[in-house]
Image: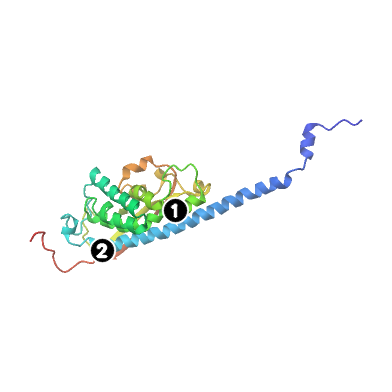
Amino acid sequence: MKPPPPIPRLLFEDRRGVVFLEFLIAFVPVWTFFLCVVQLAFITHANLMVKHAADAAARSAVVVLPDDPNEYGGEPKMNVARNRVTALDIGRALGRVGSALRDSPNSDSVVSALSEETLLNLGRSRLNTIRLAAHIPLMPLAPVNVGRDSRPSIVKAIGSQRKLVSALYYQPFALAVTFPELQGDAVAGPEITVRVTYAYQCTVPLARRLLCRAFGDLEATDELGEAFFPLAQQFVGGRFRGLQHQTTLMIHDAPYEYRAQGS
């Protein structure tokens, strides 16, 4: 009787599962490529929205900067100094937005609450009004789960109505409105350049590891330091892509002086 072949020889001669193994070898790179294409599509879409936000902020700046000082707590014309914001101001603003979501949970109510409280009345400054013009177009880009998302998915990348809520606490540290050609706090020239910098959170599995970076490694870190709440950035995890656009427009000044309040 012929003895059975040794076990190593049996393993090498066994051809069962070869097709499945070849499928796995071919599937992994194809699936990775597909996920990267999906993530790049989301980044391209976000990039277009950031460009639109920069245009909106510039259009706001050219009319807000020379506007009546009485509308901005006496802040001088052409000034973009950051007025002081207190914890009471923030609490009052978030309370009003929360009430709007509870009573009438739709985009119109959120935008109305934001325009009245969150940015316009926080410090009553021209800068906050310009920020509002950039924040509103980017609200749909806010991630459903901010920062450390242990279970990313394409569904989460597409998003839902929860983006309107998460935008309230994500955008204040992920979006910055700056003026790269400005010297000091006052605009002196006939035109203004507004730059919008946004940290877009990547949430497509695997692809975000290849195409996006940690928050602290973004190239636009300096600009994001000018965000509304920069202190929150050090507690953020996840993967991000820095997006940036700027727009230059002529100032729309009026040929007359506004009367002082009470005169």
Can residue 83 be seen in this snapshot? yes
Identify the element where label 1 is drawn: loop
In the displayed structure, does residue 16 sit left or right of residue 47? Answer: right
Q: Classify mark 1: residues with Cα within 10 Å, few (<14), some (14-19) or many (20+).
A: few
Badge 2 marks a residue whose secondary structure is helix
Residue drawn at point x = 76 percent, y = 43 percent: 16
- Residue type indicated by callout 1: Ser
- The residue most toward the right is 1
Which image quarter holds the C terminus? bottom left
Q: Nearer the viewer, residue 11 or 109?
A: 109
Q: Say if residue 181 shows up in the picture.
A: no
Query: Residue furthest toward the front?
Result: 103
Question: For the residues marked 1 and 2, what is the alpha-carbon distance in whole angstroms?
Answer: 34 Å
Q: Is residue 26 left or right of residue 222?
A: right
Q: Quadrant of the N terminus?
A: top right
Looking at the image, tell me whether mark 1 or mark 2 is earlier in sequence order: 2
Three-letter code for the amino acid on which mark 2 is drawn = Val
Residue at (29% x, 48% y) in the render:
94
- Residue name at image x 34 percent, y 42 percent: 232
Q: Along the horizontal axis of the image, is 36 left or right of 104?
A: right
Foreground pick, 90 / 74: 90
Rendered position, 8 above or below 39: above
Q: What residue sits right under mark 2 in the picture?
A: 62
Give residue 254's position: percent from left, percent from top: 18, 68
**Which residue is situated farthest in the bottom direction here?**
255
The residue carrying mark 1 is: 160
Q: Position of residue 38 (x, y in %)?
A: 52, 55
Tell me if residue 15 comes above or below residue 50 in the rendering: above
Mark drawn on residue 234: none
Front residue of 241/229: it is 229
